[in-house]
Amino acid sequence: MAALRRALHAHDLLQLAQLWQKLPASSPQTLRASAALFEQHGLYERAAILRERAGELRQAQVLWQQAGLFTESGRVAEQLGDEQAAEALYREAADAGLTRSVPELPEPGEPYDLHVPERGAELRLGLLLFRQGRTTEALPPLQAARRQQLSQAVPDGTILDELEPVIASGLVQHGLAEAALPLLESFRRRHPDAPPAVTDWLAPKPSEPREPPKLLLGRYRLQKLLGAGGMGRVFLAEDVVTMQPVALKLLPLTSALGDSSPHWQRFCAEAQILRALHHPQIVAIHDFSAAAGILVMEYLRGGSLGDQPLPLSLGKTQRILLDVTAGLLAAHGASVLHRDLKPHNLFLDAAHNTKIGDFGAALLAQLGATQTESLVGTLAYMSPEQLSGQPLTFASDLYSLGVTLFQLLTGRLPFVGPDWASQHLSQPPPDARELRPQLPAPWAELCQQLLAKRPQDRPPSLEALLEQARRLPVPMPGALDDETVRPAQLRLGSLPAADEALRPAIETAPERSEPPRGQTLIGQTNHSELFHFIDARLARGLHVERFSVEHFQSAQGQRHLHWLRTMARLGGPGLQRVLRIVLDGPQPEVHYEEPIGRQPSQDLRLDARAGMLLQKTLAAIHSAGEVHGTVADSILIERYGPLLLLSGRGPLSWPAGERLPDPQTDQLALAALLEPKT
């Protein structure tokens, strides 16, 4: 590095050429440091090459543009998945007729070559438009690129081999097959073995650009842009290692360039905490690179709550509230606040569980954006203490959750702006029943409590909010509340739909789908068989319990079905979720989430906090008029707390002729497990 610094200061071109020859074998750290030196001396094109070689594509794109090499900047934009920016850059380069050269960094062992012609903007623009299906727009730049090649003393046959089939294909699509004949003849002069007919020649699809998309962080291939904003661009990408889709966020450029502000440092620290957390109600972070400004998250096909039609039913809203509260409880337990909770940051997985995403967005908003820009779309959800610059606690997230809850229940915000700051600070929140008259009072009261101006007037803890949310009145399974519409009949084997109640679908269908592949028998009871299989659509394991039809035809079977429906409604923290109940077909079946944990033992005891959660879970079951019945052998301790199992349990498993379980039976069984062993 010292030698490069001296050569740059002395403008020693010979020494620079020798050092440039050695750079390909350097480490990424050396490449980045060298790029910074070239950038300081205004040699942006060389800095861009080094940044690109180090995998810092976003910085490279900016540097190419600063160097005036818009075609190269567009090429990198394509690799980043930003085709709109790439098209604009290619058009700018084509209109300006730029013909500058690029100093190529040689591969190790290759001879040094200072200038390599820049690939034409018309060629890249035409190929981009053709891949997008915009054939009419693609033909003029593609034909211009071919004319440019033919005008040279020695045309580049490789480029012509790429151009001519694409142009011919476009002409054929427009019904101009005869116009494609000269292109075929030109191609056959270079390749005598080419088919004689245009249709045969075009049978293989036109080749893609010679340069395949580069992998970010060595394993992620961008596919398409999902969204963009002040906090960066989000792309759908493929993890080439696991072959699974991921959501890849390119963070603001200032942060990727090594922003040393406390906001960026705090974001990086919290991203690493969340990456290790792995909570089922928090969007998983698979990878994070502070140096590259890249955050890789799980891809959730269900989209965000911001895309859902509002208002929602009470059953669906309660499930969302329980999920979000459980996720916040885990995040706050790890000392991470969200700071920007709103429907667009709450995401649905394939089974319509709610997951919290975009932690730290409020921190990123202050990087590379004006204060006004960073608050757009967020002011409507900010707590009074956040707006006034006071220290934040968990209660600030509760306030934002209150705004979100009000919106889910009524379809509008409690404060409609535009002066959100003064409204949040001083205007009393409205009663949700003014917009939804049939809303039960406990729901409206919870909104009022969450929207209290003073943090101390909000729920005292997330545990208290979780318990309060469990007790909220909702219609029983099969009933309709005031605004719901009964969902259309679902097809057997489909995922649970985002119906208004969002409870497991009691499905019927004229024919039964094939059983899932790869299923493994994991247990049998006197009334059912239990299987494990991986559902690719849900990207996780499931437990499936299959029954004989006659079991549900008895009085005890009907009791069991009522028990299942009640447990499905209560599913959440502390209770295994029922995802789907299928009654039609030769074998009724129930799908459960897969529990992962260990049973209590001498080495793994139930602590007081776990016991309290299980007691609250049992209290919710008893309040709904049901009992668990087999608590003693149904507790599993997962990473995030205890769970009462449901699969293989229920009234059909209770011994006939004996005293039926009651709430006291459940409580005594739990108490016995909590007693210290002597």
Image: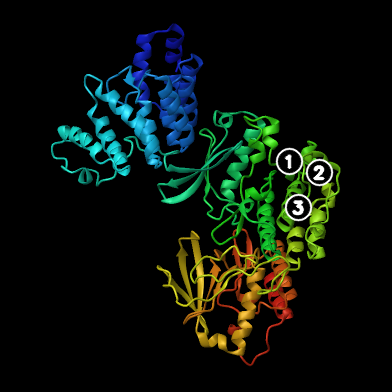
Question: How many numbered discs sit on the rendered protein?
Answer: 3
Q: Amino acid at mark 2?
A: His
In the image, residue 166 sits, relative to residue 350, either above or below, namely above
Badge number at residue 424: 2
Earlier in the chain: of badge 3 and badge 2, it is 3
Residue sitting at x 76%, y 67%: 471
Tag 3 near tag 2, CB within 8 Å = no
Helix, strand or loop under label 1 = helix
Q: What is the CA distance from the residue labelled 2 to the residue labelled 1? A: 9 Å
Residue 416 visible, this angle: yes
Residue 17 or residue 361, whichever sits in front: 361
Quarter of the image containing the N terminus? top left
N-terminal of the two: label 1 or label 3? 1
Q: Identify the element where label 3 is drawn.
A: helix
**Which residue is at a point 45% across and 77% down the rendered structure image?**
511
Circle 1 packing at 10 Å, graded few (<14), some (14-19), many (20+), is some
User: Mark 3 packing: few (<14 Cα in 10 Å), some, or many (20+)?
Assistant: many
Number of the front mark, 1 or 3: 1
In the displayed structure image, the side of residue 489 where residue 2 appears, left or right? left
Q: The residue under label 3 is which amino acid type?
A: Gly
Specify the label residue 302 is tagged with. Answer: none
Q: Which residue is mark 1?
A: 379
Q: Nearer the viewer, residue 132 or 257?
A: 132
* Residue at mark 3: 402
The image position of residue 547, as x and y in percent, is: 51, 81
- Where, quadrant-wise, is the C terminus in this rendering? bottom right
